Amino acid sequence: MDEELPLKGIRVLELGQLIAGPFAGQLLGQFGAEVIKIEPPYTGDPLRVWRELDIDGTSPWWRSIGRNKKSVCVDLRKEEGRELVRKLALRSDVLLENFKPGTLEKWSLGPADLHPHNPSLIFTRVSGYGQTGPWAKRPGYASVCEAESGFRFINGYPDEETGGLKGAPVRPNISLGDSVAGLHAAFGTVLALLSRQRQLSSGSSPAKGKTVDVSIVESMLNLMEGIIPEYDRKGKIRGPSGSSVTGIVPTNAYPCLPSASSSSSADSSTPTPSSTYIVIGANGDSIYTRLMQAIGRTDLMGPNYAHNHHRVARQEEIEAAICAWTSTRTVDEVEEVMRKAGVPVGRVNNVEDVLENEQLKARGAVREVPVSAVWGDINECEDGFQGSGWTVKMQGTFPVIDGVNPQPKWAGPELGAHTEEVLMQELMLSEREIGRLKEDGIIG
């Protein structure tokens, strides 16, 4: 089904490392783009050894973010290495990078250097603060940018006196800013490809490739809903709200009794942590009525509770009633009652629970992808994959598009697995030239 992948025939040259840029490359590669990832010889992308390591000393996280990519080792610190990358860029549709602004220009690999030779090349550039402005050259880590966008201020528990944060803000235990920036980068790249196609359709030749300038701060700012216009028009500074959300009632995480059914293994000496909280979202007017009927609190119905703005004014009373009801029941019991009443409800799942979720299983949302210690040992056959190596579970391909096969082709490859293939096929280098470049430390 490769011919049905929407980005088939698009070549992306991925520079940079870690999360934001490579996540954009992962998304583009999942939908058919050929992603050639340039990595430094010997060390590779630092993400290869971040967090948990597999039996071969490689991070399973790398196996996911590096899926469907070709790993080519070139030393960008050396002029001859940069020349190889320059030649690959001239044969590519997109150059994706997440270096500090100015780095590509220092290496003579920026738009002004390459567009005269490949006018249609799209530059997708991810950085903390963008390519322009007084902060452009500051190092921009996602955690810092999340704070500066205002996102961290609204996450945590409120101080009852000030309405601001009580203690330190709570961060999601993921690199959210990087992933959100990666999503924006992938989206921007597709828009730039569409623009290029329209230029060609209208007779403009050669088409001019756009520069997609993605800032982590601005990507997070894009998630801030009505916070800025609310401040502008009403002078309201939204603060943290714990596990609820400001101005929408009721929607919260509510405590329950410990459940007899748990994801923890009975014979495990280290029990798997599982939540005794459940999330109920009943902010729709008719849903709220069904919730109150289900928990036996019809006294909290009627004109004074009919619409969301009425309930916001009585939030404390409503939340206390729901908490009192859930606190005397297990997660299983609460879920059963809510489902019968047609009230949106969901368990606070850990990763083990997620893997057992029947809906996600039915949708193929988690995929088992082959890894081979010696790349090339795995071959695809009619019944799936065969060969030596092992498999690793990872998130599938989203969104689901009719007629598009969401199965990742391969997990993140070994370092430099495709160096010779790409340089010999695309740049027509001979085996002797490849050998000399390896000896000189230009490639790996």
Image: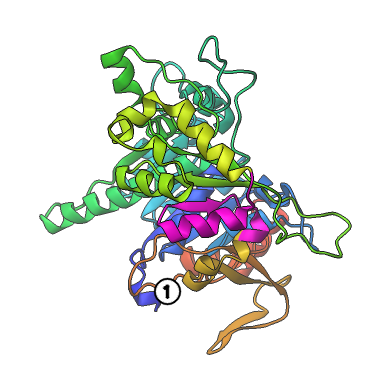
Quick one: which residue is furthest to the right in this view? Answer: 269
Label 1 packing within 10 angstroms: few (<14), some (14-19), many (20+): some
Q: Based on the displayed image, in which of its 4 quarters is residue 236 positioned? A: top left
Q: Based on the displayed image, in which of its 4 quarters is residue 413 positioned? A: bottom right
- The image position of residue 112, as x and y in percent, is 35, 36
Can residue 85 be seen at all in this image of the molecule?
no
**Quadrant that contains the C terminus:** bottom right
- The residue nearer to you, when weighing 212 against 20, is 20
- At a point 44% along the width and 32% down the height, the residue shown is 220
- In screen coordinates, is 209 left or right of 202? right
- At a point 26% along the width and 15% down the height, the residue shown is 233
- The residue nearer to you, when weighing 118 against 38, is 38
Residue that numbered label 1 is attached to: 405
- The image position of residue 37, as x and y in percent, is 54, 55
**Quadrant that contains the N terminus:** bottom left
- The residue nearer to you, when weighing 77 against 349, is 349
Amino acid at dot 1: Asn
Secondary structure at badge 1 equals: loop
- The residue nearer to you, when weighing 308 against 125, is 308
Q: Based on the displayed image, in which of its 4 quarters is residue 6 positioned? A: bottom left
Can residue 416 be seen at all in this image of the molecule?
yes
- At a point 31% along the width and 29% down the height, the residue shown is 304
- At a point 68% along the width and 45% down the height, the residue shown is 46
408 over 94 or under it: above or below: below
- The image position of residue 196, as x and y in percent, is 23, 52
392 over 220 or under it: above or below: below
Q: Which residues are magenta?
A: 328-353
